[in-house]
Image (cartoon, helix red, strand yellow):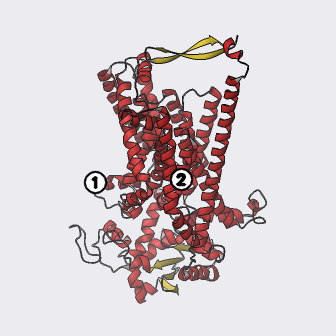
Amino acid sequence: MTTIRQRRVEKGTEVAEDQPSEEKNVKPDGKILSDHTGGKLWNILWITVGGIVAISLGLLTSVYVATLHENDLWFSNIKEVEREISFRTECGLYYSYYKQMIQAASIQQGIVNCKQYVEPVYFYIYTLFGLQAVYVIALYVTSWLLSGTWLSGLLAACWYITNRIDTTRVEFTIPLRENWALPFFAVQIAAITYLLRTHLQPVQERLTLTAVFIATFLFSLTWQFNQFMMLIQALALFILDCFDMIPTAKVTWLYIIQISGLLLVCVLQFFNSMILGSLLISFNASVLIARTVQKNLKKGGLLNRLGKLILHVLLVLGLTLLINKFIKKILNLESDEHIFKFLKAKFGFGATRDFDANLYLCEEAFGLLPLNTFSRLSDTLLFCVYVFVLFLMTVAAVIVAFRNLSGSNQVQFMEKMEECTITLKPDAAYNLIHTVLFGCLALSTMRMKYLWTSHMCVFASFGLCSTEVWKLILKCIHLYTSQRTHVIKYSIPIITLLYISYKFWPGIMDELSELREFYDPDTVELMNWIKSNTPNTAVFAGSMQLLAGVKLCTGRTLTNHPHYEDKNLRERTKQIYQIYAKRSPEDVYRILRSFGTDYVILEDSICYERRHSRGCRLRDLLDIANGHIMDGLGENEPDLKPSLYPRFCEEIKKNLPSYTIHFTRVFQNKTFHVYKLAKHK
């Protein structure tokens, strides 16, 4: 006998009963069946429209940033050397490996030969701009999953585009590793959001876990900071698990996926030691061990559970430090020590004279997030809505966490969940803690703001389109009705979209019509001279940023480059940079020749730098590390002493015999000076 489900009220909750359905079947018009079929077709149509909108917005974003890049540089019209020089600093290093790959005969004969269809440089940049489409679609889908309506995804994508200055920098730093990685991170967050939904079928859960693993692996493979981002993610999962806000079994799978993804990347990166010694692996392993050791962690009253929770946290932290110390000791790992020195100095745990740490501390990108960021984000209403939603969700999370810790058993917990007005779904809880932790990271380190601002678009749009949020607000002011909730849920986002379109569409059109052209004649002249006047086997020394361009444009061998995650390379860079310190010509010559240097490039922009204040100029950092007094007016630490020698990059230009015996100037223009090193026996 077929049955239908009928609701009855018992103890304040709705319970389903099975009820015979013959009475419904005898209706001649078949209205029940037609309503059900019509509703299903409407849902399919609604989802299809939402999917089309998502793909369209992703492609439009890709075209938008590609057009901005073309208009800014006139990329299609400049020479190849100018195109390559436009990939500044480490961007040039990353692109050089792609160029090296496509120029290899074995690869050309294989699957990467795209020259007959598109220029290699365009294949490269269009791939990255295409990943921006993936990025926007992932943000759209995450917001849609959280709110239940694709209108939320539309609003998230529009906010991402209109706040482009603070959400991405892909159009002017194309090859940066973060531009490869962040789209996969967004996909991973979308997959985790779906995974944390309740009542998933086993097949759905397995497929989603596979998607999470693939996205985690690709994210880890493409960015050097992956382990630190996923450590924050692991902390978010740990917090939620401690307060019973997400299922423990799913958290365990996510911990395992993070570890396995990192270990696979370690193997593919020729056993990258920095990964093996990462805090993420130590932390995840510690959580799994601590959970095995501590039984009945989630049973008991409030005080009992709080005591167990504090003990659990202390045990996990202690095990993390112990395991990490053990791994680094056994494998003799020091790859990431400069990061911990930087963090120690940044958060006021003692000043440092460490050159590498100070190099980070003095860069604006690693400083605090500027306050004008919030005014820009507020212009689009994004930050205002975000703070509003964040406040409401945080209050709800605190109430739910307290209720979870107070429950004595699972049955009582489920009854309270049904009876209580304030609830927080696991997917929403995860995204709440995610945005809070990454917000703290962005506030402390400006370069990491792109991880926060993009998710800010998702979180704010979800809150504005969420039935639960508006239901809670309306109940608090005693105005709740189902119809009123739906009207507000759709009308306010639409009004917000109309406001954004009205205010920012003209500016976007003006931006797309603004035309510029790449112009850097001094660097072009330098690269052309190197290609024409030096042997292919010549070895060049200089600043990390410039040498990345030398490798890309000329293919010459370098003494150092911007890949700063290797301790030996950091030490080598510090030694090479003595060309800007107060050292004798004999010392500098000996250092350069020890690395096989044939030519050294000096830059006036570094030697006479004014971009940074005193104490943060590169020459100041070298003076401090060498124990020398800095140039110019101002205080010096009492134990610093005057150097016995003048600054090398200035004195060499005087052509004194003590310098010309070792160095011969072979090229100069307004910006660069190239010296050839003598080869003494």
Identified by mark 2, the residue type is: Trp
328 shown above or below 502: above
Q: Indicate the position of residue 272 as horizontal and vertical percent values.
A: 54, 49
Residues marked 2 and 1 touching at CB (< 8 Å): no
Place residue 124 in its image quadrant.
bottom right
Of the numbered discs 2 and 1, the one sitting upstream in the chain is 2
Q: Which residue is mark 2?
A: 223
Give whichever of 501, 209 is nearer the camera: 501
Which residue is outermost to the left? 638
Q: Identify the element where label 2 is drawn.
A: loop
Residue 47 on image: x %, y %: 64, 40
**Secondary element type, mark 1:** loop
Residue 65 screen position, x and y as percent: 58, 63
Q: Is residue 83 left or right of residue 492?
A: right
Mark 1 highlights which residue?
348
Q: Residue at x 75, y 66 (%)?
A: 115
Q: Residue at x 65, y 36 (%)?
A: 43
| Up-down relation of residue 251 to residue 23 (above or below) | below
Q: Is residue 57 left or right of residue 120?
A: left
Three-letter amino acid code of the residue under disc 1: Gly
Tell me the quadrant of the picture where the N terminus can be found.
Answer: top right
Expressed as whole percent of the image width and height from the top left, the position of residue 454 reads 49, 52
Q: Residue at x 37, y 78 (%)?
A: 584
Q: In the current view of this chain or complex, which residue is farthest to the front?
A: 28
